[in-house]
Image: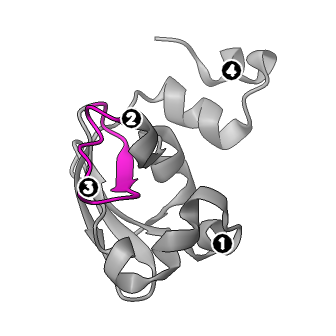
């Protein structure tokens, strides 16, 4: 395992350096909340809350998820990413461009413990 010092040399910000140096975590459960945050449970037993409002405000691929009914369709894919399908009637495992995803690394580092 690499130390925290290794990662900044590779242009990693310190929070991400600490994350990778301490070992990756897998998301085991994601629950959408009415305040446009997601409660995440990780394989190390931690529960964290990711505020998605700043990301949703950017629009782009996240625009349709400003609707709470669309936002609630969050799931974890087979690559352990936090995901939403743009069109829920299309299988994103077959049509990958239908999926909007966020890496588990980002989810962990940018979330707050609860």
Q: Give the residues drawn in magenta, as a range.
A: 79-95
- Real-space CA distance between mark 4 and mark 1, rounded to the nearest whole angstrom: 26 Å
- Real-space CA distance between mark 2 and mark 1, rounded to the nearest whole angstrom: 24 Å
- Return the residue at label 2: 96
Instruction: Tell me if mark 4 has few (under 14), some (14-19) or many (20+) residues whose alpha carbon lies within 10 angstroms of its own.
Output: some
Specify whether 23 is left or right of 59: left
Residue 84 on the magenta span:
yes
- Return the residue at label 1: 54
Query: Is any atom of residue 105 visible in this view?
Result: yes
Asked if residue 106 is positioned above or below residue 10 in the image, the reply reads below
Whole-percent x and y of residue 3?
A: 58, 17
Q: Who is closer to the viewer here, 52 or 114?
A: 52
- Real-space CA distance between mark 3 and mark 4, rounded to the nearest whole angstrom: 30 Å
Asked if residue 34 is positioned above or below residue 20 in the image, the reply reads below
Q: What secondary structure is found at the residue carrying circle 2?
A: helix
- Real-space CA distance between mark 2 and mark 3, rounded to the nearest whole angstrom: 15 Å
Decide which of tag 4 and tag 1 comes sooner along the chain: 4
Asked if residue 49 is positioned above or below residue 102 in the image, the reply reads below
- Return the residue at label 4: 7
- Real-space CA distance between mark 3 and mark 1, rounded to the nearest whole angstrom: 19 Å
Specify whether 99 is left or right of 42: right
Whole-percent x and y of residue 94?
A: 26, 31
Residue 107 on the magenta span:
no
Q: Who is closer to the viewer here, 6 or 84?
A: 84
């Amino acid at each position: 395992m690499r130390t925290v010092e290794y990662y900044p040399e590779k242009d990693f910000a310190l929070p991400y350096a600490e994350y990778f140096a301490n070992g990756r975590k897998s998301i085991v459960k994601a629950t959408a909340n009415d305040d446009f945050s997601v409660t995440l449970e990780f394989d190390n037993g931690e529960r964290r809350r990711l505020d998605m409002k700043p990301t949703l405000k950017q629009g782009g691929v996240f625009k349709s998820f400003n609707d709470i009914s669309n936002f609630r369709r969050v799931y974890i894919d087979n690559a352990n990413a936090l995901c939403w399908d743009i069109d829920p009637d299309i299988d994103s495992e077959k049509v990958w461009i239908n999926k909007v995803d966020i890496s588990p690394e980002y989810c962990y580092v940018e979330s707050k413990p609860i």
